[in-house]
Image (cartoon, rainbow, N blue to C red):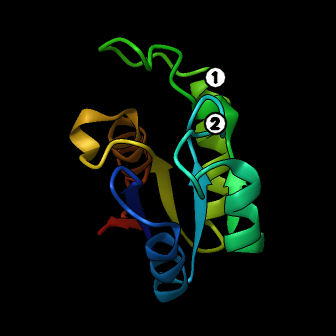
Amino acid sequence: MHKVLTFGYQGKRPEALAALAEAEDALVVDVRIKPWSRVPGWSQKALQATLGDRYVWVRELGNEEYQGTGVRLVDEAAGLAKVRTLLAQRSVILLCFEADERECHKGYVKERLLADSAGGALRTA
Protein backbone atom coordinates (compact mmCIF):
# COMPACT_ATOMS: atom_id res chain seq x y z
CA MET A 1 0.00 0.00 0.00
CA HIS A 2 1.46 3.38 -0.99
CA LYS A 3 1.66 6.36 1.33
CA VAL A 4 1.11 10.08 0.95
CA LEU A 5 3.49 12.02 3.18
CA THR A 6 4.24 15.72 3.43
CA PHE A 7 7.51 17.53 4.06
CA GLY A 8 7.90 21.20 4.86
CA TYR A 9 11.49 22.30 4.44
CA GLN A 10 11.22 25.28 6.79
CA GLY A 11 14.17 24.97 9.17
CA LYS A 12 15.33 21.66 7.69
CA ARG A 13 18.22 20.44 5.57
CA PRO A 14 17.87 18.74 2.16
CA GLU A 15 19.63 15.66 3.55
CA ALA A 16 16.63 15.07 5.86
CA LEU A 17 14.32 14.94 2.85
CA ALA A 18 16.70 12.65 0.95
CA ALA A 19 16.86 10.28 3.94
CA LEU A 20 13.07 10.19 4.23
CA ALA A 21 12.64 9.56 0.49
CA GLU A 22 15.15 6.72 0.68
CA ALA A 23 13.62 5.18 3.81
CA GLU A 24 10.11 5.29 2.34
CA ASP A 25 11.21 4.42 -1.22
CA ALA A 26 9.20 7.49 -2.21
CA LEU A 27 9.14 10.13 -4.91
CA VAL A 28 9.36 13.75 -3.82
CA VAL A 29 6.60 15.74 -5.50
CA ASP A 30 7.36 19.46 -5.36
CA VAL A 31 4.00 21.26 -5.18
CA ARG A 32 5.35 24.81 -5.07
CA ILE A 33 4.10 27.18 -7.74
CA LYS A 34 7.75 27.95 -8.54
CA PRO A 35 10.50 25.48 -7.70
CA TRP A 36 12.91 28.10 -6.41
CA SER A 37 13.96 29.14 -2.95
CA ARG A 38 16.23 31.67 -1.32
CA VAL A 39 17.10 28.93 1.17
CA PRO A 40 20.21 27.09 -0.06
CA GLY A 41 19.60 23.54 -1.25
CA TRP A 42 15.86 23.89 -1.85
CA SER A 43 15.71 25.10 -5.46
CA GLN A 44 14.86 22.71 -8.26
CA LYS A 45 18.41 22.19 -9.55
CA ALA A 46 19.78 21.49 -6.08
CA LEU A 47 16.91 19.09 -5.34
CA GLN A 48 17.47 17.28 -8.63
CA ALA A 49 21.14 16.91 -7.72
CA THR A 50 20.31 15.61 -4.24
CA LEU A 51 17.34 13.39 -5.12
CA GLY A 52 17.98 12.41 -8.73
CA ASP A 53 15.02 10.59 -10.26
CA ARG A 54 13.16 10.72 -6.95
CA TYR A 55 12.29 14.39 -7.62
CA VAL A 56 9.43 15.72 -9.75
CA TRP A 57 7.86 19.17 -9.89
CA VAL A 58 4.10 19.25 -10.46
CA ARG A 59 3.40 22.90 -11.25
CA GLU A 60 -0.32 22.21 -11.57
CA LEU A 61 -0.48 21.74 -7.79
CA GLY A 62 1.17 25.07 -7.07
CA ASN A 63 -0.93 27.43 -4.97
CA GLU A 64 -1.68 30.69 -6.77
CA GLU A 65 -2.75 32.14 -3.40
CA TYR A 66 0.54 31.29 -1.68
CA GLN A 67 0.92 34.84 -0.34
CA GLY A 68 -2.64 34.87 0.95
CA THR A 69 -4.68 32.58 3.11
CA GLY A 70 -6.57 30.56 0.52
CA VAL A 71 -5.89 27.66 -1.77
CA ARG A 72 -6.27 28.04 -5.52
CA LEU A 73 -4.26 25.45 -7.39
CA VAL A 74 -3.00 26.12 -10.91
CA ASP A 75 -4.87 23.07 -12.31
CA GLU A 76 -6.10 20.84 -9.51
CA ALA A 77 -7.60 18.10 -11.68
CA ALA A 78 -4.51 17.73 -13.88
CA GLY A 79 -2.13 17.90 -10.92
CA LEU A 80 -4.02 15.31 -8.89
CA ALA A 81 -4.16 13.03 -11.94
CA LYS A 82 -0.37 13.26 -12.32
CA VAL A 83 0.21 12.39 -8.67
CA ARG A 84 -2.30 9.53 -8.79
CA THR A 85 -0.27 8.08 -11.67
CA LEU A 86 2.89 8.37 -9.57
CA LEU A 87 1.14 6.80 -6.58
CA ALA A 88 0.31 3.75 -8.64
CA GLN A 89 4.07 3.08 -8.65
CA ARG A 90 5.24 4.15 -5.18
CA SER A 91 4.69 6.40 -2.19
CA VAL A 92 5.00 10.17 -2.56
CA ILE A 93 6.22 12.99 -0.35
CA LEU A 94 4.52 16.32 -1.08
CA LEU A 95 7.11 19.11 -0.71
CA CYS A 96 6.54 22.77 0.11
CA PHE A 97 7.98 25.33 2.55
CA GLU A 98 5.79 25.41 5.66
CA ALA A 99 6.72 22.91 8.36
CA ASP A 100 3.10 22.33 9.42
CA GLU A 101 0.92 20.86 6.65
CA ARG A 102 -2.14 22.50 8.26
CA GLU A 103 -0.63 25.86 7.35
CA CYS A 104 0.15 24.90 3.76
CA HIS A 105 -1.70 23.82 0.66
CA LYS A 106 0.26 20.53 0.63
CA GLY A 107 -2.08 19.40 3.42
CA TYR A 108 -5.05 20.19 1.18
CA VAL A 109 -3.48 18.24 -1.69
CA LYS A 110 -2.84 15.26 0.61
CA GLU A 111 -6.45 15.27 1.82
CA ARG A 112 -7.74 15.40 -1.78
CA LEU A 113 -5.58 12.43 -2.75
CA LEU A 114 -6.69 10.42 0.27
CA ALA A 115 -10.36 11.32 -0.26
CA ASP A 116 -10.09 10.16 -3.86
CA SER A 117 -8.85 6.74 -2.78
CA ALA A 118 -12.22 5.48 -1.62
CA GLY A 119 -11.01 1.92 -1.98
CA GLY A 120 -8.32 2.50 0.61
CA ALA A 121 -5.37 1.98 -1.71
CA LEU A 122 -3.55 4.90 -0.07
CA ARG A 123 -2.63 5.70 3.46
CA THR A 124 -1.15 8.65 5.27
CA ALA A 125 1.96 8.75 7.39
In this view of the protein, which residue sits in the foreground, 119 or 48?
48
Which residue position holds label 2?
A: 79
Tell me: residue 7, above or below residue 107.
Answer: below
Tell me: residue 53, above or below residue 78.
Answer: below
- Number of numbered markers: 2
Q: Amino acid at mark 2?
A: Gly
Residue 79: horizontal and vertical position, in percent?
64, 36
Query: Most extreme residue toward the bottom, as rendered?
Result: 23
> How far apart, in angstroms, are the residues tagged by discs 1 and 2?
6 Å
Tell me: residue 41, above or below residue 97.
Answer: below
Q: Amino acid at mark 1?
A: Asp
Which picture quadrant has residue 87? Answer: bottom right
The structure residue drawn at horizontal position 57% and vertical position 27%, both measured from the top left corner, is 76
Label pair 1/2, CB-CB below 8 angstroms: yes
Residue 63: horizontal and vertical position, in percent?
50, 24
Q: Is residue 114 visible?
A: yes
Which picture quadrant has residue 106? Answer: top left
Which residue position holds label 1?
A: 75
The structure residue drawn at horizontal position 76% and vertical position 72%, both measured from the top left corner, is 52
The structure residue drawn at horizontal position 75% and vertical position 63%, both measured from the top left corner, is 48
The structure residue drawn at horizontal position 44% and vertical position 66%, both measured from the top left corner, is 13
